Amino acid sequence: MKLRSGRLLTAPLPPIRQAVAHVVNLPGVSNLTIGDPAISVPQSVRLAGADAFLSGPHSYTPNLGLIELRRLVVKDLETRLGLTYGDDDICITNGGNQAITLAIAATTQPADGILMPSPGYPNFTMAAHFAGNTIETYDCSEDTQWLPTLHTLERAYRDDVSLLILNTPSNPTGAVMNPHQLAEIADWARFRNLWILSDECYWPYSDTGRFSIAQFAPERTYILDSFSKRFGFTGWRIGTLAAPRGEANKLLKGQEATVACISYPAQAAAMAAISDRTGHYEREYERFSAQRNQLVETLNSLGKTPAVGNGGIYAWANFSQVVDTTRNDWHLDLMKTANIAVVPGSAFGENAQQWGRLSAAINENDFALALERVRSI
């Protein structure tokens, strides 16, 4: 008898990682694929992690995370967004991806539907496959400035949907939702009795204000934040998930069943980073936002690669006048002709075939070379 395969057999491969893999063995190519901000991590933050590693403790930490770090997150959410949380409403996660998995497990049953954006972060889809959910995508197209509308949400809604995923600023498009739009969607989610997962990990890089749908629907919203994008900790795997009041006990159970806890050194470094008052990180946010804006402006100036992006760390550009974007591997042609590696839009949704994502969060010298190559397209 043949052994049965599980759900992961039919789950899609990680398309962003596939694009990155094409660059690994090609020295000299400007790598604008992966969202790994080249943030300079301050010595004080590194030492906090190193001291914790050397001195300990080396035992388990609490499932939800160190109380000291959770209190800092509570204070941060109150300062930034005017939101009130208790210490036990916060879960420290193994990066943003585990936060997605935990939120889905806390708000859905197998076979429940999840509404998610298209184009959108492909790991939303992967996490839904992992949990056995059905996927309903809502269109975020050029016609709506890459943002959801009540019309596109209602058109995608099905009776079995229990969770709405939002992402602002958007990965990949950089679109940012304003308070009016968030309030409208909060009312709609309340009408449809949906939970909300709000992925806000790119909030430091928004040019148009920093808002959350939790300001309008706190009773049903989980807020995801990633210290990877905020503090340059992509390899340390640490993030946060703020739950509606009384709901974090579900996250505690999910944490125990998956990773048990987050390492003490990573949390010690995170405490040092979130407590930093030198202005270092703010200057890094400004630098990458400026590079993103310069990349968008340069692409638009060519007259054949229209681009957008007013939040996040990416430029989102249409390459249909430059290469044959009817092919899924058109980004390989761009790599050969211009020495530039991008992620093709098809990685983010079927409605984005002609578009590509370019990361601007690289060091200054590499960015200058990449910009020179973009001008030669």
Image: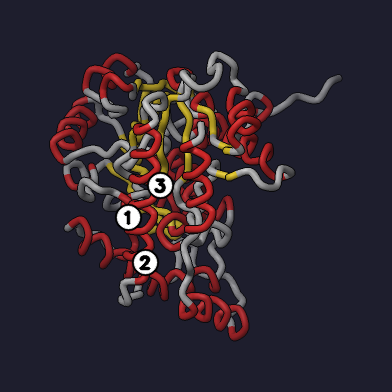
**Which residue is drawn at the image coordinates 42% and 49% (left, top)?**
250
Mark number displayed over residue 281: 2
Callout 3 amino acid:
Ile
Give the SS element for disc 1. Answer: helix
Crowding at dot 3, Cα within 10 Å, few <14 / some 14-19 / many 20+, comes out as many
Residues at marks 1 and 2 touching, judged by CB atoms closer than 8 Å: yes
| Residue 65 falls in image quadrant | bottom left
Vertical side of 132 occupied by 267: above or below = below
**What's the residue at 58%, 59% (across, down)?**
235
The residues bearing labels 3 and 2 have C-alpha atoms spaced at a distance of 14 Å
Mark 2 element type: helix
In the picture, residue 197 is in which quadrant?
top left
| First along the sequence among labels 1 and 3 | 1
Is 162 positioned to the left or the right of 132 in the image? left
Mark 1 or mark 2, which has the lower sequence index?
Answer: 1
Q: What crowding class fits label 2: few (fewer than 14 Cα within 10 Å), some (14-19), or many (20 or more)?
A: many
Residue 272 in view here: yes
Crowding at mark 1 (Cα within 10 Å: few <14, some 14-19, many 20+): many
Between label 1 and label 3, give the one nearer the viewer: 3
Colouring style: secondary structure
CA gap, disc 1 and disc 3: 10 Å
Q: Which residue is mark 1?
A: 204
Figure quadrant of residue 297: top left
Residue annotated with mark 3: 313
Give the image location of residue 286, x and y in percent. Answer: 32, 58
Sequence-wise, the earlier of marks 3 and 2 is: 2
**In screen coordinates, is 156 left or right of 217?**
right
Q: Residue at x 47, y 35 (%)?
A: 357
| Mark 3–mark 2 CB contact (< 8 Å) | no
